[in-house]
Amino acid sequence: MKQKQTVREILKQDREILDLEVCGWVRTRRDSKGFSFVEINDGSCLQNLQLVIDHTRLDKNQLKKITLGSSIKAVGDLVLSIGSKQKWELQCKKVYLLGEADPEKYPLQKKRHSDEFLRKIAHLRVRTNKYSAINRIRSKAAFFIHKFFQERDFHYIHTPIITSSDCEGAGELFQLIKRGEKETKFFSKNAYLTVSGQLAAEALCMGLGRVYTFGPTFRAEDSNTPRHAAEFWMVEPEMAFFDLNDNIDLAEEFIKFVTKNVLETCREDIELFRRFVDKELIGRLEKVVKDPFVRIEYSEAIEILKSAHKKENFEFEPIWGDDIHTEHEKYLCEKQFKGPVVVYNYPRTLKPFYMRVNDDNNTVAAMDILLPKVGEVVGGSQREERLNVLIENMQKKNMDIEEYEWYIDLRRYGSVVHSGFGLGFDRFVMFLCAVSNIRDAIPFPRTPGTLSY
Ligand code: 4AD
Ligand code: MG
């Protein structure tokens, strides 16, 4: 009986097999003395499978249409290849053209295309080695994220996409209105796409103990940078009885776990990025897995940046109370510490209402994790569990307390020390693949001014 197999399954065989069936898209074709050597790829792995097609077995007209990008099905025997490039090849008995791709019009050629060009054909770019590799790594990273939490008694929860609150308080919200309606009649109040699942995760954590949500989040930031998207995926764990230190420990273990497993499982794909994008990629990932992350207080980070300012001449002068900008993050991770850096205890005024106020009354128990090349990948904190301090924070930020009564309830009934963080999944994928623009880490990116597909 014929067996339908993926190219990846076929290539890991250790014996010759008769009558295999395989489908894929043509990547290369070379003709010689009555034979065609056609490499197909089916997305299951980076490697192609070589098909050997005897011209007598196929109608001339069909044969002509086996061109780059066309799709075919082949049935044949898997034999050891005489060519030195590959171990196996499929000696075809039957070949069926499934879908042609006019060589005059098909936008992908055998040469290397620029990232900018490929962004304009995002619906086709997944047929290149680079973009199929990114998407396979995305998939495996997501899998290991679930594995990490599931093995540690975390429950996977689903937090709402439509919300009425602005968790981060930055006002960068997309508003949701029913088509044709001018006002916000549908929900009888303003509705937005969520910027973070945290507040709902906190509620569920207060009964489930350890939870995580992993889903799309939205920010109407007008920043047109290589690491901001309007729609991105975030992993947000929330843990009861965890203080800031426990939170940082968990985040570090988490990043190490996913990086290590992706390195092991996606070696071939990672190797592609090492060869063609960044020679230091694998060393950088291994270092993240092996070395403890540097941990410094925000005040210390500002001191370091202040002394570097003379030499580096940053665009933004480092000042206590101001944000740590991208250029500062780069300096800390790439020059000063040459590895991941955890910055904690930020000024109270910089951070949202839910973060726990430290004893100095001036800083909050916040933490960011910065990675080389991408900068901030994680933002998290210990949450304010004291009812009176929480309300005071909300008043300071002029929040509508009534809207948050449910959230305040969590501090009225059985409140406990708890913490959590959010990891920007797309930025993490950038880090794993040494991709320098978030538009290439997301299959169909949404950024200011672009909404194709
Ligand atoms: O630091 P942020 O804003 O933290 C929160 O939203 C918390 N409520 C998370 C929590 O504690 N549960 O965002 C978390 C991470 C950032 O560190 C960054 O990696 C990513 O989300 N991120 C973005 N990624 C892509 N495009 C954007 N516009 C992003 N904004 C944040
Ligand atoms: Mg942040």
Image: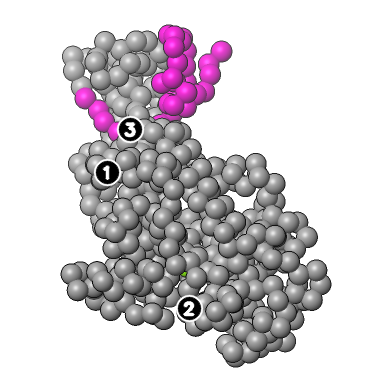
Q: Does 258 lie within the magenta span?
A: no
Task: Kindly state the secondary structure of the residue where label 1 is placed.
Answer: loop
295 or 16, nearer to the observer: 295
Instruction: Tell me the tag on residue 303.
Output: none
Q: Is 60 on the left or on the right of 431, as rendered?
A: left
* Discs 1/3, front: 1
| Image vertical order of residue 90 relative to residue 297, above or below | above
- Look at the numbered disc 2 and say if its residue's Cβ is closer than 8 Å to ligand 2: no
| Rendering quarter of residue 422 | bottom right
| Label 1: few (<14), some (14–19) or many (≥20) C-alpha neighbours in 10 Å | few
Residue 306 figure quarter: bottom left
Instruction: First in sequence, mark 2 or 3: give its number.
Output: 3
The quarter of the picture where the C terminus appears is: bottom left
Q: Which residue is mark 1?
A: 280
Q: Alpha-carbon distance for marks 2 and 3? A: 56 Å
Q: Residue at x 36, y 46 (%)?
A: 433
Check disc 3 and report its element: helix, strand or loop.
Answer: strand
Residue at far right of view: 413
Q: Is residue 161 above or below residue 427?
A: below
Residue at the far front: name it.
360
Magenta residues (range)? 1-30
Which residue matches tag 3? 26
Q: Amino acid at mark 3?
A: Val
- Residue that carries the numbered disc 2 in the rendered image: 347
Residue 416, position as x, y percentages in the image: 73, 66
In this picture, residue 273 sits left or right of residue 203: left
What's under tag 2, amino acid-wise?
Answer: Pro
